[in-house]
Amino acid sequence: MIDEIKKSFSKQGFMKTLGAKILHIKEGEVKIQCMKVDNLTQQHGFFHAGVLTSIMDVACGYAALTIMPENSDVLSVEFKTNLLRPANSKLVVATGKVVKSGKTLVFCEAKVEDEQGTLYTTMQATMICLQKKNAN
Amino acid sequence: MIDEIKKSFSKQGFMKTLGAKILHIKEGEVKIQCMKVDNLTQQHGFFHAGVLTSIMDVACGYAALTIMPENSDVLSVEFKTNLLRPANSKLVVATGKVVKSGKTLVFCEAKVEDEQGTLYTTMQATMICLQKKNAN
Amino acid sequence: MIDEIKKSFSKQGFMKTLGAKILHIKEGEVKIQCMKVDNLTQQHGFFHAGVLTSIMDVACGYAALTIMPENSDVLSVEFKTNLLRPANSKLVVATGKVVKSGKTLVFCEAKVEDEQGTLYTTMQATMICLQKKNAN
Amino acid sequence: MIDEIKKSFSKQGFMKTLGAKILHIKEGEVKIQCMKVDNLTQQHGFFHAGVLTSIMDVACGYAALTIMPENSDVLSVEFKTNLLRPANSKLVVATGKVVKSGKTLVFCEAKVEDEQGTLYTTMQATMICLQKKNAN
């Protein structure tokens, strides 16, 4: 499953654009890190809300995938981001966790923190499990 | 106001990264366009949900700014994205609109469509109006 | 379908408690009305946010049911309410609409207005289609 | 503060309708309980999503109030409910917690569980702090 997730992650052009890296994968939990560089900022030089949302979404999606049957694929149904404070940290980590998994839907939550544990954003997300059309 | 918005938009490093462009600004409504290129995709080659969310967020933020007092600054409080279908279109447009503005908070909604009017995502968002510390 | 919805609605004890009534059912759209009485208020005498959310949720659920296959049942997956202004009107109407329907999930939106068209709340909601276990 | 919250809660006609009771108030956290009776159900006899949302909203609102300045009043700006599983329990408890408080806005989260700790719903909510017009 870890290999599948890493392979899928490496196919996400947008994760490369963000310079995002998988830090950690375990059953029901995935961590993604991202460094603040100029091309990821909003008008005041903070992390763009869209960047933080993107890594939370991906962390939730792969957290959901860890508990899905083999040959599953995951798509985001919806997510909701609360922006607690501007994120001016050099490095942030998004942690996505499974809250409840059903046959079709997986409910997840995520947060973005820096290395000091300051909390920047939170997310509630719903993921859907799809059967892969072919094993590749 | 249009100049202020364009100036603010040009300071958003992340908007450059997305290749996003302002298409249209009027009172209470802003449109942002984005082209699908490889560095904005998820694992199946569709637009990443985070990209679509980012341009909806920005469209909402500037739509809110159009109706705020001069020298205001806008920050996103929270937003919620529904992902209706995978977005495989070459070009998408995010439209952000003000639904209700109060003294402090502005409620907005947004959607992402392609040029044929196919609807990909919807958003509800809350923006907050801040007084700029200095006019630059 | 209209009969099925009315029958299902009549089984909702909570809708009786709210004094809610179905005003209108058509394909992809349902309207529910509710009168402001003392037992539906919050601490300032306005409609409680939970009441407005409840009738939006129900309007979305039945709007979704109108476009599902026969013998379907609908459950709410999630919803998000924006509270634009306190609702002090005597009568409010929740309108729920289908935005996009898939095989399993139906994306809806809703709003609460009074008879003058003042908008109080908006909702994005996701509904899931379940096969009924038996036809009763 | 506890007295203020109890007084405010007792003014909420809708909380009486739900038979809801405050179980617990501490800084940044409030618990509200509710019993399943027929007039709070949806069409299958489970707790109505609107009931669970209502008590989570109230728990968040008063959790926010515990950390606001004296003579503050709290209003819900928005909330988002995920419905993890149908709630068929006899008694449920909503726990609302402050995640981050600012000068104007307070970010909260809530959940509904039964006495065995089964989790039924989760919420992200944003509350706004208003200055009371008069001390009564």
Image: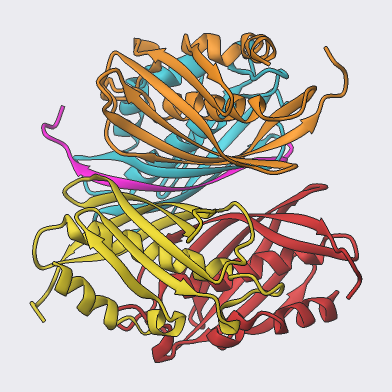
Chain colours: A red, B yellow, C orange, D cyan
Q: Position of residue D107 (x, y in %)?
A: 40, 54
**Split into 4 quadrants, where in the image is the N terminus of chain B?**
bottom left
Task: Confirm whether the magenta stretch covers residue B39.
Answer: no
Q: Nearer the viewer, residue C119 or C77?
A: C119
Predominant secondary structure in magenta?
strand
Query: Going by the image, does D124 lie left or right of C84?
Result: right
Task: Read off the magenta span.
Answer: D116-136
Query: Going by the image, does D128 lie left or right of B34?
Result: left
For the point 32% across and 68% down, which residue is it?
B23
For the point 65% across and 15% down, which residue is it?
C5
Task: Confirm whether the magenta stretch covers residue D130.
Answer: yes
For the point 42% across and 61% down, which residue is it?
B94
Q: Position of residue C108 (x, y in %)?
A: 55, 38
Query: Going by the image, does D131 lie left or right of C57?
Result: left
Looking at the image, which residue sits at the far bottom? A37
Determine if residue A61 is in view. yes
Q: Nearer the viewer, residue B129 or D33?
A: B129
Looking at the image, which residue sits at the far front? B116
Q: With respect to residue D9, does D126 lie above or below?
A: below
Q: Quadrant of residue D14?
A: top left
For the point 57% across and 84% down, which residue is it?
B39
Q: Position of residue A42 (x, y in %)?
A: 34, 78
**Split into 4 quadrants, where in the image is the C terminus of chain B?**
bottom left
Q: Position of residue D16 (x, y in %)?
A: 44, 16
